[in-house]
Amino acid sequence: MKDNIETNYLIFISSDGKKAGFEIFKERIEKNKWPIYKTTPQLLNVKEEKNVIFYIAGTGEKKQCFVGYAKIKKIIDRDLTEADPNQEFRQVLCNVEFKDFRTFKKEIPIKDHIDNLSFIKNKEKYGLYFQGGVCKINKQSYDYLIDIQK
């Protein structure tokens, strides 16, 4: 299946749970500990040295925006299987620790840049590309988002 092809570029998505998506994102980054669930679609791609861009889904502050980027430093707490306090009924398989983390000077609203994001084929239904907590992004779109902040 085409979607299982390995990539070096991922999007980690923070969505609303017991708190707003942006609050959950800030908490995870502060602790440098991002939960990966058993049902994460891109689980096989979550590996050390992968490039990650962070996206806030949901309805709260910085919703539907890219807010920063990092590299995966290491996978910790393998085979953890504990519940995530922010996302009820989600079993955590492991956690990701980052290096070279940077927040964007200003968040990047997806709607302002969607025409330049080639990994999103159906622009009207872009939300479908952000399902499951971790999704793939192609190098061109990743570079485009990083370059906006330079």
Image (cartoon, grey):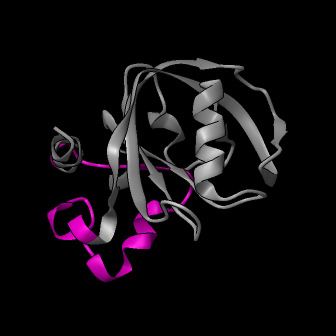
Residue in the image at 70% along x and 21% along y: 78
29 or 8, which lies in front? 29
Residue in the image at 32% along x and 42% along y: 105
The x, y position of residue 67, in whole percent, is 40, 47
Residue 31 sits in quarter: top right
The x, y position of residue 147, in whole percent, is 15, 42
Apparent side of residue 94 relative to residue 143 in the rendered image (left or right): right
Instruction: Judge whether 134 appears above or below 61 on screen.
Output: above
Instruction: Judge whether 40 appears above or below 111 on screen.
Output: above
Instruction: Judge whether 53 appears above or below 120 on screen.
Output: above
Apparent side of residue 42 relative to residue 68 in the rendered image (left or right): right
- Residue 1 visible within the image: no
The x, y position of residue 109, in whole percent, is 34, 63
- Residue closest to the far bottom: 124
Residue 43 sits in quarter: top right
The x, y position of residue 120, in whole percent, is 27, 66
Tell me the magenta residue range. 112-140
Apparent side of residue 54 relative to residue 43 in the rendered image (left or right): left
Asked if the stretch drawn in magenta spans residue 125, the answer is yes
62 or 13, which lies in front? 62
Residue 75 sits in quarter: top right
- Residue 97 visible within the image: yes
